[in-house]
Image (cartoon, helix red, strand yellow):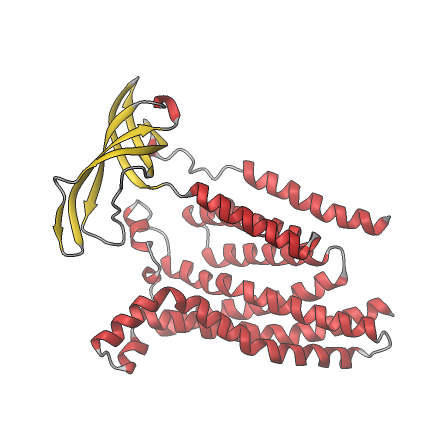
Amino acid sequence: MISRLKKNSVSLLAIVLIAILMVLPTGYEDAVIYKGTDRVQAKVISTDESTVKSSGLIQSGEQYCDVKILGGKFKGQTARAVNMLSGSLESDKIFREGDIAQVVISYKDQEILSVTMTDHYRIDKELILAGMFVVLLILFAGRTGLRAVYSFVITVLAIWKIMVPAYLRGVNPIWCGILMTAFLTVLIIFLVYGWDKKTLAASSGALAGVLVTCVMGCLFTDAFKIHGAVMAYSESLLYAGYQDLNLTKIFMSGIFIGASGAMMDLSVDITSAVNEVIEKKPGIGWREAARSGMNVGRAAMGTMTTTLLLAYSGGYIALLMTFMAQGTPIDNILNYKYVSAEILDTVIGSFGLVTVAPFTAITSGFMLTRKYK
């Protein structure tokens, strides 16, 4: 009965926390640029490309679309919308008849002043994909899968509702990132293990790795002379009126935040392995249990390091292809600031993993053998 109450209390705590985060205001809900506008979906009825100028792959000018508005105060009305083309393949999009688009309607009283096409509407597909993932996870892992969904939602909400607004307000990114990472680490591991010493053992190991990653990331970001402007859209943030933000410290915080997930995985793997050994052999000493955890850690560290490399480098395939196509020497590639930033992320994150393994093995062996005795 007590065990069931503990399990239910974990889920209840997660649901309450999700509810609190969902209603928590960020302070940036009423953006000035969206006042006097209606952001809705619209169906493209017809298109007009007569003013679009094409030059190979590049298109510029304006595409005009007749659209039927699907929501908001002008639902059911038709209007002529404009799709501005800047000549950038990255940001431009072309609409076709039958597409569902996200549009911004500028209006005054009951009169539509202009309609601007912003992008294709994708949220419905995103919800379908997320729903498929949730169903598969729960079918495969049951209660643990449901808790994984809770942890995923809490992480997204905490980053969006707490960490991002704090960064925008100028809170020190290092301390804010450390506190947020520590909170999420303990909470996520708690959702996995519940009210158990395994939570304390795994959390302590993961937090040790986070602290090592934080210190080394700060030191070597300065040593590498990496500016935070290497982050995507960081300069746009400065031009939006946030010139006082310290982009370099935000980049530093991103190093240990990005690696914290892999460190949590490793700490949970080692803790679970040590716990399994102790369950099968309750009389085992803590040193022998810790040695078993270290053996698991050694095997896992090799794949975890590669996981970090693949995770960070996956978004830079086009950059590497450009280097190869241009015949850029390898020493120039390694010295390039974007590549150096990725090397920094990967190697510093790997240092954290190396710290996590022995520390988690020792704490798990010590705490869990005491639990069973």
Give the residue displayed 38% in from the left and 61% down from the top.
248
> Measuring 56% from the left and 56% from the top, which residue is drawn there?
179
| Residue positioned 30% across, 17% down in the render | 110
Residue 357 in the figure: left or right of residue 105 = right
Labels in figure, total:
0
Identify the image quadrant of the C terminus.
bottom right
Residue 102 appears in the picture as rendered: yes
Q: Is residue 216 visible?
A: no
Q: Check the image and report above or below for 28 versus 274.
A: above
x then y, percent, for residue 213: 51, 69
The image position of residue 353, as x and y in percent, is 56, 73
Query: Dividing the picture into quarters, in which one does residue 121 lie?
Result: top left
- Taking the image as shown, residue 244 lies to the left or right of residue 162, namely left
On screen, residue 172 above or below 347: above
- Between 47 and 340, the one lying in front of the other is 47
**Placement of 319 over or under 105, stated as above or below:** below
In the rendered image, the residue lying farthest to the top is 110
Residue at 58% from the left image edge and 69% from the top image edge: 209
The location of residue 220, given as percent across then percent down, is 42, 73
Asked where in the image residue 372 lies, by quadrant, the reply is bottom right
Is residue 372 rendered to the left or right of residue 153?
right
Q: Position of residue 61 (x, y in %)?
A: 15, 43
Q: Nearer the viewer, residue 359 or 50?
A: 50
Compared with residue 111, is residue 45 higher up or lower down, i.e. above or below? below
Q: Is residue 6 left or right of residue 108?
A: right
